Amino acid sequence: MFKKGTTDTPSYRDTLRAHRKPHHFIRNGIALVALGLFVTAAALAVVKPPETPTVYQASKLLALPEPFPQPLADSTTPFISETQIRRGDTLAALLQRLRVQERGLQQFLVQNKDARSIYKLYPGRSIQAALDGDGNLLWLRYNHTPAANDNGKYVSKWLEVSANGDESFTATEHSQVADVQVRIAESEIKSSLFGATDSADIPDAITLQMTEILGSKIDFIQDLRQGDRFRIVYESYSHEGREIGAGKILALEFVNKNKAYEAVWFAADKLAGSYYDFSGSSLKGAFLRTALKFSRISSTFGMRKHPVHGGWRGHKGVDYAAPTGTPIHSTADGVVEFVGKQSGYGNTIIIKHHSNFSTLYAHQSRFAPGIKKGQAISQGQLIGYVGSTGWATGPHLHYEFRVDNKQIDPLSVDLPVARTLDGQQRKAFDRSVALYREHIQLLATDQSSDDTQVASR
């Protein structure tokens, strides 16, 4: 029997046992952890650490290089700075960017007549300044007018202003024939022709030539398709490493609607050059119908009452009425046979063409610069300007088309077809075109290789 309230009752022992159990577990857990640490420590104690590798060090005393006998920068060498003209730029702003502070310079540039080209601040062109070690101006150079000369070659023109050292200056114009490089390029039509040429860094002047050369074969407004491709070889002119203009297209292949059109420049004999396809066929007719782009016929070929002398006389040409100064263009390739005054014709040019053909252009107000006897002329080239010299009652062009020096009505005659190359001309053509053909084929091969790599990815 158990007495109530004593420590001998079962409920009391159970309660006491329940309180004691956690202490056994804790004690046992501590023992196990201690045992584990001991085992781990024992295990670590038996593992030898790796041996530290031996590090070798070596040193050597190196002699310093000998000092330069002279300073790296020659104090007499000018410091040249350059800036490009931006829209809205003033002369003062340009001089400030160039750090030119020469007293009296701006006033000289504004007032001196020899420095007048400085007023034409074309955006994109450059101005250079050379300063000495003390910041004094040596010269100022403005590359202002890259242009073609009378012989069709590009020249670089620049104004150079020199400082005389006594707050006075000298302005001088210079020009020099530019260097010629041959460039090759290709591109694909994605949105427009100009977009394709811009992506290939082809000048706009070359793009326009492309449309003129193949304009009779391709309608560049209606016929272009996405995926059309062209390959081109052309001239580029530069001066002192700076590109100043584009020359002519030397060779061209244009693939339009999966059909290839070709053009290559070739000059036969002493005549001015023209464009042919790779087989040697000319891309243009031998003669244009008219020497003026915009005019009206004021007198046709045949009998008429003479406007000056009266009476009925035979009129051996066609008169085209146009304002004084209207440009006159040669109707075909040829060589100048006569240039000067001819009695009633006034200022006249006669051009000898292939075979027995010649043309006459009369009553001109003036001739184009550089036109002289014996000069090769290309079809469409500017030769003069409309006037009223000689026996003329008003400004117009008198144009004659001659066969064996006999005047023929140019409005009714079947104009000669384009010239064909034969004999020695054909051999010369084949030699000349071989290199350009190789450039075009090389571009085509590279493109085929690129397409193959893209397709295989």
Image: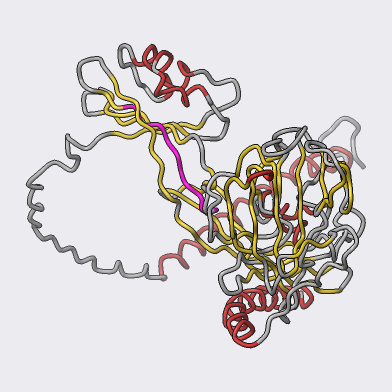
Q: Quadrant of the N terminus?
A: top right
Number of on-image labels: 0
Furthest residue in direction front, as rendered: 311
Q: Verify whether residue 255 appears in magenta.
A: no
Q: Residue 429's x, y, as percent?
A: 62, 80
- Color style of the picture: secondary structure
Q: Residue 142's x, y, as percent?
A: 43, 32
Q: Nearer the viewer, residue 369 or 243?
A: 369
* Image vertical order of residue 401 relative to residue 278, above or below: above
Asked if residue 30 can be seen in this view, the reply is yes
Q: Is residue 94 left or right of residue 435?
A: left
| Residue drawn where x is 47% and y is 26% of the image | 117
* Image vertical order of residue 349 relative to residue 405, above or below: above
| Residue drawn where x is 68% and y is 79% of the image | 445
Q: Verify whether residue 159 appears in magenta.
A: yes
Asked if residue 201 can be seen in this view, the reply is no
* Image vertical order of residue 165 relative to residue 67, above or below: above
| Residue drawn where x is 31% and y is 70% of the image | 51
Q: Which residues are magenta?
A: 152-161
The rendered magenta stretch, by its main secondary structure, is classed as: strand
Q: Residue 326's x, y, as percent?
A: 73, 38
Q: Is residue 83 left or right of residue 211?
A: left
Q: Quadrant of the C terminus?
A: bottom right
Q: Is residue 256 left or right of residue 70?
A: right
Q: Nearer the viewer, residue 375 or 175?
A: 375
Q: Residue 255's x, y, as percent?
A: 81, 70
Q: Quadrant of residue 333?
A: bottom right
Q: Quadrant of residue 234?
A: bottom right
Q: Is residue 59 left or right of residue 159?
A: left
